[in-house]
Image (cartoon, rainbow, N blue to C red):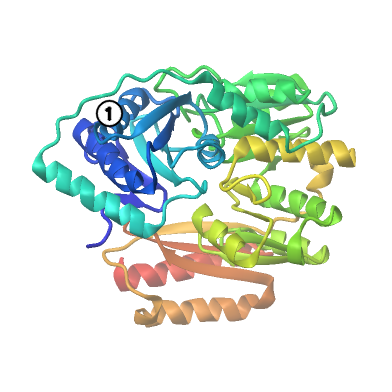
Amino acid sequence: MAKQLFGTDGIRGVAGQFPLDPASTHAFGMALGSVVRRLGPDPMVVIGMDTRESGPWIAAQVAGGLEEVGVGVQFAGVVTTPGVAFLTRTNAFVAGVMISASHNPYQDNGIKVFGHSGYKLPDEEEHAIEEEIFRLLAAGVEPMPARLTVDEGLDRRYLDNLLSTIPTPLPRFRLAIDCGNGAASRLAPELFCRAGAEVIAIGCEPDGRNINLGCGALHPGYVRNSVLEQGADAGVAFDGDADRSIFVSKSGRIVDGDAVLLIAARALRDRGRLPGNLAVATVMSNLGLERALERLGIRMTRTAVGDKYVLEEMLRSGAALGGEQSGHILFSAHSTTGDGMLTALQVLAIMAESGKGLDELAADLTTFPQRLVNVRVREKKTLSDLPSVVREVQDCEAELGSSGRVLVRFSGTEPLARVMVEAADQRQVDEFTARIAGAIEREIG
């Protein structure tokens, strides 16, 4: 039986509807408990959540399910996804659960699970939990929420650990931070003040429904305005669960994950902490990043889109650094998952060490024009079964040579084909994207 609940980033859906209704979330807690009880006596699970209005009742139902089968719970309250991963691997927890839908609107929510290693559960364990959920629902589950009290000491440990990764205090940077009214809303202002920055905090007033709403990493223009108006040295925006970050330079330049990868790779290489002079990125990272790294003698490996695949390649190759254009950056020396606040601290430390601002640090990244087009399709086929599309892709690649890239892939969740073309010439980008998208529409649109 194929997995029906777990995607690449846990379970996700509309809060209150299957699989995030009270009965299903309670059954999830029971199912997770049945798995972790095999790992030793008196197992404990840590639970955290972001600021969505559905978070408290989902957390209470998950905890109720765990307690029903004899598994103890500690509640971290509002904390980031990487915070839950850290707490799980550095304490006596057999698993960690994060209630969040990341960058999605407030109506959505999700459940992410970490093993004691701090990594997401392997597929076979997710499959076992899923089968147990369906068995419990078929037998009938009475959703009974647990009473949860926040353990304030948990997020203290997380912040202390983040600060331990850099020399403090840093120079008194004037830093604008946009927490997206999400999980970092209380933690980030404290963290960066403790690091020595003068903090201008926005997007830090969650009301349960304004998470990611016109702010945060998906809307960097909000923090950009603050940087320019307040004369800040830099700005950083986090998404709802703060596992990614997007930066803004003093001049107002948006500094995305590609630019951060370049900045971090160069700094780690100079410190002798970039094994194999290797960085891991995805197929969506700009060709300009690859060229800039080449000039520094740094090799870049590409993976499929998703921080899960970046992490898998980092573990396989022993890389110390990887990430996505969208702002998920992984420092394997410090974390088992992308961490927006950790990334921001590392970038500030590089600025302090080099005496340079983000404009200077990212100056050698020349971004190639890139266009992404989504084509709605009636069915998904392998490219080899679409001869006219294959010919069009081959013709475009032949014309581009080494001066550009073509990427065609299907969405994993929607009936869409995604066409990306990247080249030094904007005219070629527009022309080739239209040609390939047109071929797909004629074949399966």
Q: Amino acid at mark 1?
A: Gly
Which residue is rendered at x = 61% and y = 28% of the image? Answer: 157
Q: Nearer the viewer, residue 71 or 130?
A: 71
Q: Residue furthest left?
A: 139
| In this view, 247 is above or below 366 | above
Is 178 on the left-hand or right-hand side of 105? right
| In this view, 265 is above or below 197 | below
| In this view, 59 is above or below 270 | above
Quarter of image, res 403: bottom right
Q: Residue furthest front?
A: 41
Q: Nearer the viewer, residue 275 or 304?
A: 275
Q: Position of residue 223 (x, y in %)?
A: 64, 28
Question: Image quadrant for the N terminus?
Answer: bottom left
Which residue is rendered at x = 73% and y = 40% of the image? Answer: 346
Count of numbered marks:
1
Q: Residue furthest right?
A: 355
Query: Can the viewer see residue 155?
Result: yes
Query: Can the viewer see residue 412?
Result: no
Which residue is rendered at x = 70% and y = 47% of the image? Answer: 260
Question: Image quadrant for the C terminus?
Answer: bottom left
Crowding at dot 1, Cα within 10 Å, few <14 / some 14-19 / many 20+, comes out as many
Q: Position of residue 217 (x, y in %)?
A: 56, 36
Is 352 on the left-hand or right-hand side of 262? right
Residue linked to disc 1: 64
